[in-house]
């Protein structure tokens, strides 16, 4: 076991510029004390729709064919 002690005072960083309070919530993704409100990003909804489309296209391909492999790769990549 190694223990090291040093008497070093670390100064607090000075506050510079405009201070903004940030709140992450459920209704809005981000709200600031300046009144800025950002909607929540909807990555899952958009990607889920695309995945559904790609899986439908994959279902119609003949298993083992070159086009099936390409469609399989697209689904896996998404």
Image: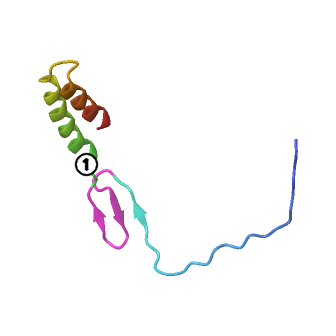
Residue 59 versus residue 20 in the image, above or below: above
Q: Residue furthest top?
A: 63
Residue at image coords 29%, 61%? 38
- The image position of residue 62, as x and y in percent, is 15, 19
Residue located 63% across and 74% down the image: 13
Q: Quadrant of residue 32?
A: bottom left
Tell me if residue 13 is in the magenta stretch: no
Q: Secondary structure at mark 1?
A: loop
Question: Which corner quadrant holds the C terminus?
Answer: top left
Point out residue 51 in the picture as x, y percentages from the top left corner.
21, 35
Residue linked to disc 1: 42
List x then y, in percent, for residue 5: 87, 57
Residue drawn at point x = 23 percent, y = 19 percent: 64
Direction front: furthest residue = 66
Between 7 and 43, the one nearer to me in the picture: 43
Q: Is residue 15 left or right of residue 39?
A: right
Q: Which residues are magenta?
A: 26-39
In the image, residue 1 above or below residue 72:
below
* Residue 1 coordinates in the image, percent (x, y): 88, 41
43 left or right of 13 in image: left
Mark 1 crowd level (few <14, some 14–19, many ≥20, 10 Å Cα): few
């Amino acid at each position: 076991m190694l223990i090291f002690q040093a008497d070093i005072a670390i100064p607090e960083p000075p506050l510079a510029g405009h201070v903004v309070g940030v709140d992450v919530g459920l209704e809005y993704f981000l709200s600031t004390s300046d009144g800025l409100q950002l909607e929540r990003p909807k990555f899952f909804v958009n990607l889920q729709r695309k995945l559904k489309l790609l899986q439908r296209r994959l279902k119609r391909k003949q298993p083992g064919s070159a086009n099936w492999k390409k469609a399989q790769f697209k689904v896996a990549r998404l």
